Amino acid sequence: MLSFTLLQAGLSTGLSVVPAIAVARALHRREFPGRSFLVVLLILPLTLPAIAAILGVTQVYGPNGWLGGWFQLYGLTGILIAHVFFNLPLAARLLLSRLESIPADSYRLGAQLGFAPRDILRHIEWPVMRAALAPAALLIFLLCAASFAVVLILGGGPQAATLEVAIYQSLRLDFDPARASALAIAQVLLCTAVVIAGGRKLLPESSMAAGKGLWKNAYARSPGSLALDTSAIMLTVLIVVPPLAAILINGLSSLPAANAVMKAAFTSLTIGLASAALALILSMPLAYFGARAASEPSRRFLTILSLSAWMLPPAVIATGWFIALLPFHFGGLGTALLIVAMNALMALPFVYGGLAAPVAELTARDDKLCASLGLRGLSRLRSIDLPSLRAPLVLAGAMAFAVSLGDLTAITLFGSGDIQTLPALIYRQMGSYRMADSAGTALFLAASSFAAMWFAEVWARKT
Amino acid sequence: MKKYPTIAVFSFLAFIAPAEAKQTLTIYTYDSFVTEWGPGGKIKQAFETSCDCTIEWVAPGDGVALLNRLKLEGSGTQADLVLGLDTSLTAEAQALGLFGRHGIDKTRAKVPVPWADDVFLPYDYAHFAVIYDSEKITSPPKSLAELVDGPAEEKIVLQDPRSSTPGLGFVMWMKSVYGGKAGEAWSKLKRRVLTTTPGWSESYALFTKGDAPMVMSYLTSSAYHRISENSARYKAAIFSEGHYLQIEVAGLIEASPEKELARKFLDFMLTPGFQDQIPQGNWMFPASDTSSPLPANFNEEGAPPKTLLFSPEEAAANRKAWIEEWLNAIATP
């Protein structure tokens, strides 16, 4: 059980993160029609509830899928395909936002020194990416270890069960909180070990001043790099687009017009925005603290802290909260707040990961200047920090929004029927034989998050 | 000065008091009972006109989640009534010591087995059945044995008994047919299992997408397709050994301040006002009289040759061991 968890999560992480390096570089240095469309698409898998993504994947690769069952989907193959679909784009997006923070001056300097593309990678891009790589890989590893719907369904059944399934079972059917806690502690220890082992180069050391603008194409003229970039982009398109296209096509045949969908969309939007705001509010102090922390162990501790919602299974955290809050008989609003808090916690690693490096660069650049000007507290935040952090803040917030939009864990644990988000509606439609309607709702969910991401990208780039 | 908050509290109480005059009956149920397609809305309407009270549905998830909510809340539960447990969960629910006797004439409950429970009262039932895609399977299995021994190329999607009630129902079904040889039967069936999903919804979605030509579901699933979708494509296979039965029940909370109202609801539950909503709202068979007979095509396959059902005590005592047996057989490569 444990070894399978490690195997599938390790393989999924490797297959997602390694190609993502090439994909991020290609997206960074190439301009091509549809590039910004593709960049927005990268976050989309993250917002899909697991079952919608699984149905998209089986529509393409399943026995009755477009590829006509060329190969055996159910098993390790299925798990890996789904996890790469979820996480390669995520890793590419995380790395891309780091690459985009490299100032044009660095490339200019490289050009003056006669750097070959290889040298640019080694001396300019790799240090920046490496700083983001370890946290991204850790996060993806944890996401894969925790994704039990994908593992159970596409893994072909309980032979592929993970630790998470065992925890879920002891909480649900056996209702044995003691066993669940013991297993949860085992999972936390496992994850902490992975974090510590893999976390030696966890936080960005780069102190390069962030600048605006890109220095593109000048270093990417060799046919070899063009071929590499083209194939990286083709690969992304091939991995990301078909399942999304399946969701689009299935959904179009039964577009939702019902009130229920609009109402659920409004609920999802409200919860998503509130969770994103809360995740940003929680992450900012963490990021500042991390940037100024002197010691390596305290930085590592912060990263572990930001990952806590994924190290401890969300179901365990939620049950704990439920027991703690039981005496207070909270109503609908209390439930909504719990869901928001839970979603914010789940979004924390994405947000913290997106903010840590830019905040570190900012504090390194501006702390002395601000001190000498006597700018402190809110006035500094307003006049200096927020404007220069706008792009990372908007993108991190958008990611938190995406995570919350697709979440079903918090809602199924706390929900009481009156709070219905889009993923909950998808599930209820499926549970009432309305498979076609649920495909329509899934399309609506995907389309709304696409619109939100598009808006965020445009806003982040606005100067 | 201290007086003022007290006065404020009292005037506030005076303000909300009239609203309290209407009794509220809090019913815990499962999710799909109270969706816009479920029977909950119409049942609430029908009961409220007769009682001058308000029904508040609380739906924490499916039947298993419902039981867990009760375990978590214990005697502090807000529920006056719980509707939606099935007979494989009732022994455990009763052991919580929360439920009181229903005090209603048990012969009014019309289910395929004689009803003897003083605590829980049935409101609907259905046999489990394998549903198959008639466009892909021309000769469906006629028995559980044929399902177990049949060709490996024709796949079935099952549910995990650890998280799904139909999944658990199928474990009980296998056990009641194969007894001590269930482990072997699982190992044989394994060849035909495309995958096992956490809940019914995922399995049914994979089935209707065409990934597998068979799925574990309810006898009444075919009625949904015939009546709501006007399609005869998906049919239920009738097995000669008989079919395992799911009976869904409700019970009242002994310590509830609204116990009398809860009892009134249980009485209402076995009248047409409630039962009329069941066949095409919950897609189950009614457990008492409806005002008009069921549509002719509701049960085209006819009743199963035999009904299989363990007593709640047997089911509760053996559940863990039987799930373990399933897991060992199916999870060994």
Image: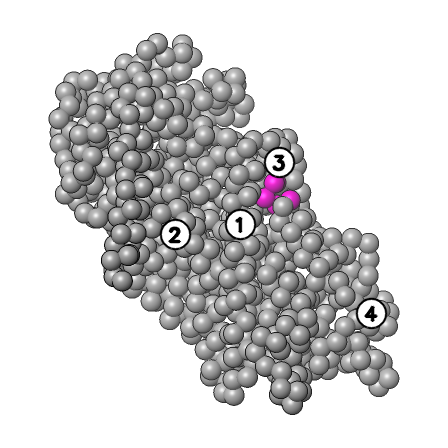
Residue type, mark 1 in image: Thr
Please identify, in this view, whether the residue under mark 2 or under mark 3 is nearer the observer.
Answer: 2
State which tag comes first along the sequence, 1 or 4.
4
Q: Are marks 2 and 1 on the same chain?
A: yes
Q: Which residue lies at the image location 39% right of the left edge and 27% below the top edge?
A: B41
Task: Tell me how far mark 2 sits from mark 1, CA to CA.
Answer: 14 Å
Q: Which residues are magenta?
A: A443-447
Residue named by callout 4: A216
User: How far is the residue under mark 1 from the one under mark 3?
Assistant: 24 Å
Residue A170 visible in the current orientation: no
Magenta highlight: main SS: helix
Q: B333 left or right of A95?
A: left
* Residue located beneath label 2 in the image: A334
Task: Read off the residue under disc 1.
Answer: A270
Name the chain under label 3: A
- The chain under label 4 reads A
Instruction: Mark 2 vs mark 4: give the one in front.
Output: 2
Above or below, A233 relative to A53 = below
Relative to B174, is A32 above or below? below
Instruction: Find out whether the residues at labels 1 and 3 contact each other: C-beta distance under 8 Å.
Output: no
Q: Identify the residue at image location x=17%, y=30%.
A: B260
Numbered badge on residue A251: 3
Q: Amino acid at mark 2?
A: Gly
Q: Which residue is depicted at the point 38% across and 68% down?
A: A188
Instruction: Give the mark nearest the N terminus, 1 or 3.
Output: 3
